[in-house]
Every structure is written in structure tokens, then in C-alpha cells.
Amino acid sequence: MAPLTSIRTSNGKLEIVNQLLLPHTTEYIDINTIEEAHDAIKTMKIRGAPAIASLAALSLSFHISNALAATPSPEFLTSPESLKTYVEPILSFLYTARPTAVNLGAATRRLSKKLQTSFVAGTDVRTIAQQLADEGKLIADEDVGRNEEMSKWGGDWLLKRVGDEGSASGLNVLTVCNTGSLATSGYGTALGLITYLHESGKLDKAYYTQTAPYHQGSRLTALELQTLKIPSVMICDTMVGSLFQHYKIHAVAVGADRIARNGDTANKIGTYNAAVLAARHGIPFIVVAPISTVDLDVADGSGIPIEQRPPLEACLVRGALYTGAGDATNEQAVVMITPRGLDGIYNPSFDVTPAELITAIVTEKGVAVKKPGEVTFDLSGIV
């Protein structure tokens, strides 16, 4: 069965699957404006650092392409200078949608750089605009190939690391949040590694955590694994320690929203908990993410901005109405699961896992491990 798709581009339309309604309802919504793209990212209709970056880049690409086809041409296409003045605030605006996901910043900076380098003497504004639109599409197109490469790097490294410890039926791998095709432009990062092991006949089961109620990660992972027919087990994130005590788990594989220069990694809330428990039980902890996730300008995790979500979100859960007969209806509802008027709610979207708890960091360029006796990474070989 074909994997799910977070973004669709066909017949001149840009669409995303509304992840707030998954896994019970699959509904694609049009993204017609820059403002709609910003809102989709901010309200988490689309999520996953690579997918966010792809949508931002594509929204600008479609916006520019539509302007080039319009009659009469909009005012910002009258000169290279007017194009630059128009586009740069758009890129800044898109960047504000999700502050922790560094891929978004990498995409907007890349588009800004393309805009700057296109200002060659004599180049007309429409040529510059077309180059910018093409660059936006390229950012999204490159993601799938990167994911397949890093998944193979990470999968092969893990198989070699585990060696004879692997069970006859294959490896058991735990993951946190969603890092599959719904979080990327296709195939996935950490979930891509799991898919690679499954396709290679080396996977027994995928385990995935159910995190805070409003975070859709586990539900999306469940849907993706079900679609790909990968044997899997869902657990509550508070049950990870018990799982490690009673079952043989060969590795934990997670994605990342930002990796600092020393290897400290920000990922969905609950990742740090899993890393601490993995270290306690001697289980390899692997971060799988594209190079664009590595932020060499941030020395360590203390410099990573952590997005604080609205407190109310931690009190709400969305789901299909349960019939009481072991099934659910197609009707969905949002319910409050906490008492009214709580004094305080701590609701970060991400936590930071220190490099010392991470066994390996995988990008499309290879696998980085720490030198003997060191607690941080040298990422120069994989960026």
C-alpha cells in the first residue's frame, strides 16, 4: 500500500492533509495564500520539521508562479528591487510560524540567498522570480531522496551495532512522535529507518509512544505503520521504562527539530524521558534527521528556543466518538480532560536530549558517533 502524503501538488494546486483530523478522517485542504501556509504550520495542521519547511517553500513558489501567470502583472514584478522588497518580509513571516524547527529557517534562508544571488547585472525581474519559484520546489523535492539515504545509513549501522544480539525474527525499535511520510515530503527519518529495516526483513516490531493528548505524533505513526503493514505496538510514554524492563528493545530511533553543534537535540516532548531510560538500560539511542536540522550557530541545547504551546491545548483531546462496541463512529469531537480553572499548565512542545545520552546521529551524509571518552559530537563529517 502506498504511504500517506502530507503535501500534494497537482493541477496547479497546493494541498495538505489536515493532520488535526487524522487518523479518523483524511481531508486535504487547499493552501492558496502565504497566510494560509503560516496558519497551517502554526496551528499544526501540518507538522514535522521537514514537512513544515517544504510547505513554506512551496507556498512561496506557488505564490510567485501565480503572480508570473497573472494579467496584469502585480506591482512587485516591475523590477528586481521591488521583488526583493516584497519577498523578504514574506520569508521573515513564514519563519515565525514554528520557532524550534530549524528546517524552516534553513528553507527561508536558502530562498533568501537564492534571491540575492539571482541579482546578476542585466537579469530581468521575471527571470529572478522564476528562479526563486524553482528553488522552492527543489527544496521539497530533495527531501525524499535524503530520507531514503539516511534511513539506509542508520539501518545498516544499527544492524552492525546489534550484531548477534538481534533476535531471529528481527529487531525491535522504539520511536517517539511521528517521523514518517506525514512529517516529511516522503519516506521519513526515524520512521524511515524502521521502514528500511522492515523492507529488508530485519524488523520484528516497531514500538511507538503515545505522548501528550494534543500531540498527534503517535496517532499519525499508528496510521502510517498500519498503512505500510509494519507490525507495531503503541505504548503510553509513561510506560517506556516498563517496556525496557520486560521486552528486548534493540534501539530507540527518533527525529529532531534542531540539533546543536555539540549534538544536543530538540525533539517532541517525551524524547528526553526515553533517552534517559534507554541509557539506564543500555539501549542505543539514535537521532535521524537531515543536515538542514543541524544548527552549527547554536553551540549546545541551552541555545535552542523551545516553543511553548497554548496552555489550553494540554487540556483538550480530539478523537472519534466511541460507540461502546469496540469501535468508533466517523463523528469527531474535542473534549476537555482536565478540571476547569487550573492554576498553572506547563506545556512545552519540545524537550532537549543532551548529547551524552545520544549514541549516534544520522544524516544523509552518514553516521556520527562520539569519540572514545567524549560526551559530545563532532558533526563536521556529516554536515
Image (cartoon, rainbow, N blue to C red):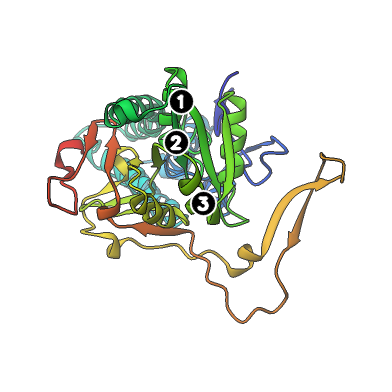
Element type at mark 2: strand
Residue in the picture at 75% in, 60% down? 335
Q: Position of residue 139 (x, y in %)?
A: 37, 33
Q: Earlier in the sequence, mark 3 or mark 1?
A: 1
Taking depth in this image into account, of 354 and 89 the one nearest to the observer is 354
- Of the pair 220 and 197, the residue shown nearer to us: 197
Image coordinates for residue 360, horizontal then vertical, percent: 27, 41
Residue 40 seen anywhere in this rendered image of the structure: yes
Q: Amino acid at mark 3?
A: Ser
In front of the other: 360 or 183: 360
Q: What residue is pinned by disc 2?
A: 173
- Residue 306 rendering spot, x and y as whole percentages: 40, 62
Q: Quadrant of the N terminus?
A: top right
Secondary structure at numbered mark 3 = helix
| Disc 3 crowd, CA 10 A, few/some/many (<14, 14-19, 20+) | few
Q: Residue at x 71, y 52 (%)?
A: 318
CA separation, marks 3 and 1? 21 Å
Sequence-first tag of 2 and 1:
2
Kindly identify the amino acid type of the residue bearing the numbered disc 2. Answer: Val
| Tag 3 residue | 242
Q: Please give the residue where the numbered disc 1 appears in the rendered image.
A: 203
> Which quadrant would residue 289 be assigned to in this image?
top left
For mark 1, give the secondary structure: strand
Q: Are marks 3 and 1 in contact (CB under 8 Å)?
A: no
Asked whether, in this view, residue 98 is left or right of residue 145, the answer is right
Location of the C terminus by quadrant is top left
Return the residue nearer the eye: 103 or 126.
Answer: 103
- Asked if the residue at tag 1 contacts the one at tag 2, i.e. Cβ–Cβ closer than 8 Å, the answer is yes
Residue 14 visible, this angle? no
- CA separation in Å, label 2 and label 1: 8 Å
**Closer mark to the observer between disc 3 and disc 1:** 3
In the rendered image, the vertical position of residue 127 relative to residue 106, given as above or below: above
